[in-house]
């Protein structure tokens, strides 16, 4: 019998009220069952939200540095369990073990950073316009945060949201992706082991029904979502109608520009990692490579040669560079985009089909794929594929390269390789993205830096860094008048 997992509500493991479950399999070995997980509904979300609401007053009243000590213990436990967590991550979502170790390390860094920030939840003091009066602002937690995350970074991305929310004194209801439920369960157990009080953190598994119930629940005061643009747009409409604070991170179509003066060895290494790390299944993936015409042909040939060295396989095996796509739906989507690229006139130089040799036939493997002769208006240059597909475009100048990079509705990560400091600074200014790398691929952010995008990637809020603590707190303005008399602010107090 496969392992059966439960929701975590008010400090206890419980089944979904209706008893429904869904299966999760290893995408590299589809005959291997990870387990059965609760297919939760509105009643399960309601129980979790009510538990969080009940736990909120005591947690928010706990001195912030004491909350920080619990976060520090969480970091210690993540460190102790790092390899075990990474192994299970790889088993359920596919990326190589070295990558999932990095995923857990990012959670470790985030835990310690959030712990330190509990001593730095600054307000402001400013002069008053009136005598014998003191003005200040303080931060207060929002209440109960509903968190919904994607499957591709199933430990790191949830902790970008969970740890700052806890640090600020909020209670949480967390719904992980159905494609990475086991990581969510392991994280819930770890938080409990670290001493997070019952009800402060609650885990509800499930799909769209659970997500919709979470967003709409009256006890949920703020929502943070990482996932697709289509789902994020629906959540945005609901939160707008219900006046809930909302943070969205919804994807990217990221470009790496390579100029003729670049360190081409470094640029080649960068695009291999940026395009095919995590099998291209990350919102920061380098899905477009914009090459200056002076180096275009030679660079493409070198890239094709290096792509042949990438080893596909089960990520917990030694020597694997590229794991599977997460499920059959993802495999079918990538295959459709290969057909689209060919129909639009792009040249398929390598890859383009499912990998079925030997043990690869057991999983959702797709060959690393490169399209050349791609025009900026082609769908494969504009739409997020979320797979190991790289589109190469040619530019005659920096100005044209920047226009190509910006010719997408997304704006998450961007990159330029150049030795010219003037071009580097122009790119920092010109590239329409929340993140710009100079001489690095389009990867994500460090734990103490803001992460997020512009345009259709996000709605202005950030995960990570100092800005995320603004999202999980409300500003309260406080006036102390010790004059002993009524002083009317915002009146005409000028001498007549």
Image (cartoon, grey):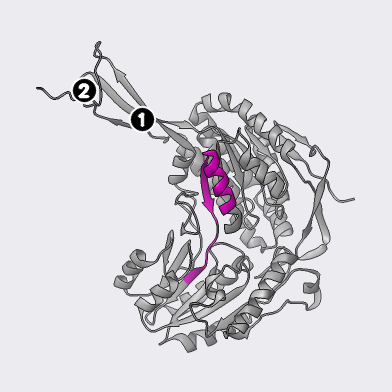
Q: Is residue 235 magenta?
A: yes
Report crowding for label 2: few under 14, some 14 to 19, many 20 or more residues within 10 A (C-alpha).
some
**Pointer 1 or 2: first along the chain:** 2
User: Which residue extends farthest front?
Assistant: 241
Residue 389 position, x and y percent, is 60, 74
Q: Look at 17% across and 23% down and name the residue there.
A: 493
Q: Nearer the viewer, residue 493 or 422?
A: 493
Residue with the mark numbered 2: 130
Q: Nearer the viewer, residue 321 or 11?
A: 11
Q: Is residue 108 visible?
A: no
- Asked which quadrant contains residue 75, the reply is top right
Residue with the mark numbered 1: 137
Q: Which stretch appears magenta?
A: 233-255
* In the depicted structure, whether residue 280 falls above or below residue 164: below
Q: Look at 29% across and 71% down and name the residue there.
A: 422
Residue 68 position, x and y percent, is 52, 34
Quadrant showing the C terminus: top left
Q: Is residue 455 magenta?
A: no
Q: Look at 49% across and 66% down and name the residue there.
A: 442
Residue 179 position, x and y percent, is 71, 55
Considering the numbered disc 2 on the image, is that residue within a helix, a strand or a loop? loop
* In the depicted structure, whether residue 201 falls above or below residue 310: above
* In the depicted structure, whether residue 79 falls above or below residue 327: above
């Amino acid at each position: 019998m496969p392992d059966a997992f439960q929701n975590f509500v008010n400090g206890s493991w419980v089944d979904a009220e209706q008893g429904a479950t869904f299966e999760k399999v290893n995408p590299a070995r589809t005959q291997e069952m990870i387990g059965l997980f609760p297919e939760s509904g509105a009643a399960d979300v309601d129980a979790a939200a009510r538990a969080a609401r009940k736990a909120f007053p005591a947690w928010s009243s706990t001195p912030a540095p004491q909350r920080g000590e619990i976060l520090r213990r969480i970091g210690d436990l993540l460190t102790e369990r790092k390899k075990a967590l990474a192994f299970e991550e790889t088993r359920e979502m596919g990326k190589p073990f070295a990558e999932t170790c990095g995923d857990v390390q990012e959670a470790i860094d985030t835990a310690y950073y959030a712990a330190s920030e509990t001593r730095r939840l600054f307000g402001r003091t400013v002069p008053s316009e009136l005598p014998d009066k003191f003005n200040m602002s303080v931060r207060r937690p929002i209440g109960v945060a509903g968190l919904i995350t994607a499957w591709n970074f199933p430990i790191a991305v949830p902790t970008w949201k969970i740890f700052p929310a806890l640090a600020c004194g909020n209670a949480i209801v967390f719904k992980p992706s159905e494609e990475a439920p086991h990581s969510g369960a392991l994280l819930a157990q770890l938080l409990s082991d670290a001493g997070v009080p019952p009800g402060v953190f609650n885990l509800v598994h499930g799909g769209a029904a659970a997500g919709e119930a979470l967003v709409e629940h009256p006890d949920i005061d703020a929502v943070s979502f990482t996932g697709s643009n289509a789902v994020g747009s629906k959540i945005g409409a609901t939160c707008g109608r219900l006046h809930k604070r909302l943070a969205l991170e919804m994807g990217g179509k990221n470009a790496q520009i390579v100029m003729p003066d670049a360190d081409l060895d470094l640029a080649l290494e960068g695009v291999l990692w940026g395009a095919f790390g995590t099998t291209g299944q990350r919102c920061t993936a380098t899905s477009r490579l914009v090459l200056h015409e002076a180096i275009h042909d030679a660079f493409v040939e070198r890239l094709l040669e290096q792509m042949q060295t990438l080893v596909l396989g089960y990520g917990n095996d030694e020597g694997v560079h590229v794991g599977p796509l997460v499920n059959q739906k993802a495999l079918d989507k990538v295959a459709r985009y290969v057909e689209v690229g060919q129909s639009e006139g792009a040249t398929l130089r390598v890859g383009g089909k499912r990998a079925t040799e030997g043990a690869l036939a057991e999983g959702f493997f797709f060959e690393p794929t490169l399209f050349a002769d791609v025009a900026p208006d082609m769908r494969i240059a504009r739409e997020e594929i979320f797979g190991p597909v790289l589109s190469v475009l040619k530019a005659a100048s920096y100005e044209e390269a920047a226009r190509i990079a910006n010719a997408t509705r997304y704006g998450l990560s961007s990159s330029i390789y150049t030795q010219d400091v003037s071009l580097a600074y122009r790119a920092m200014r010109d590239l329409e993205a929340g993140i710009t790398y100079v001489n690095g691929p389009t990867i994500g952010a460090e734990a103490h830096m803001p992460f997020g995008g512009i345009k259709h990637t996000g709605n202005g809020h950030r995960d990570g860094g100092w800005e995320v603590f603004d999202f999980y707190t409300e500003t309260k303005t406080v006036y102390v008048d010790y004059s002993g008399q009524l002083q009317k602010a915002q009146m005409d107090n000028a001498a007549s």
